[in-house]
Amino acid sequence: MKDPQLKELLLQALETELGGVEIYRTALECVQNENLKAEWQKYLEQTTRHEEIMRGVCESLGVDVDESTPGRQVVHHIGKSLVKAMEMARASADPKGAELVACECVVLAETKDHSNWELLTQCAEHAKGDIAKVLQAAVEEVEDQEDEHIYHSKGYCRELWIESLGMDAVLPPPEEEKHVKTAIGAARAQQSRDDMI
């Protein structure tokens, strides 16, 4: 592995978690569905913990948690933009419309977050010594939660959109009911939704 690029990934992952905390706080101001509100509250708590874990990983590996790189600046900008989008929706849209925007923003943020943790898993598998130990410990604590975040959020977003279009929605979504944590599980859950209506 190339050490400078691993450092870049670590800093981007930390910034993603920092932004994620703000994204969930803002999303919670937009949410209307009580089940989704409970889900996002749990995800906010987990994301706060993920930020602490990433800080610890960086510090353990000698990476300055305050270092700014062009990639980290982009991740920061995207996070702030997602927060701004939700604030705009809350100010100008109906409450259900703001909830949909919040759902989409969460899915966008969780897509980057999920990608980071997939890459950190790969790094943990290929690293040696202390780097491998530090990364493996972080991945073991976080990866299943990140899988849940992305697949359940996508399910909520789909079903809330279906509901807004006047069609029968499955809420909470099948991904939630089936406790999905894999892409295959998400595909199966989505296929089963017609049987749940």
Image (cartoon, rainbow, N blue to C red):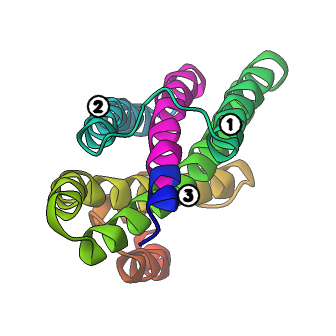
Q: Earlier in the sequence, mark 3 or mark 1?
A: 1
Q: Classify residue 49 as left or right of residue 5.
A: left
The secondary structure type at the circle numbered 3 is: helix
Q: Earlier in the sequence, mark 2 or mark 1?
A: 2
Q: Nearer the viewer, residue 110 or 126?
A: 126
Residue 181 in sight in this render: no
Q: Secondary structure at mark 1?
A: helix
Q: Nearer the viewer, residue 149 or 47?
A: 47
Q: x%, y% of residue 132?
A: 20, 64
Magenta residue span? 9-32
Q: Are marks 2 and 1 in contact (CB under 8 Å)?
A: no
The structure residue drawn at horizontal position 29% and vertical position 31%, both measured from the top left corner, is 52
Alpha-carbon distance for marks 3 and 2? Answer: 20 Å
| Residue tagged 3 | 111
Give, as a three-letter code, the residue at label 1.
Gln
Tag 2, which secondary structure?
helix
The image's mark for residue 52 is 2
Q: What residue type is disc 2 on?
A: Glu
Give the spatial CA distance, label 2 vs label 1: 20 Å
**154 in the magenta segment:** no
Q: Which mark is residue 73?
A: 1
Q: Position of residue 148 (x, y in %)?
A: 34, 57
Q: Residue at x 79, y 16 (%)?
A: 91
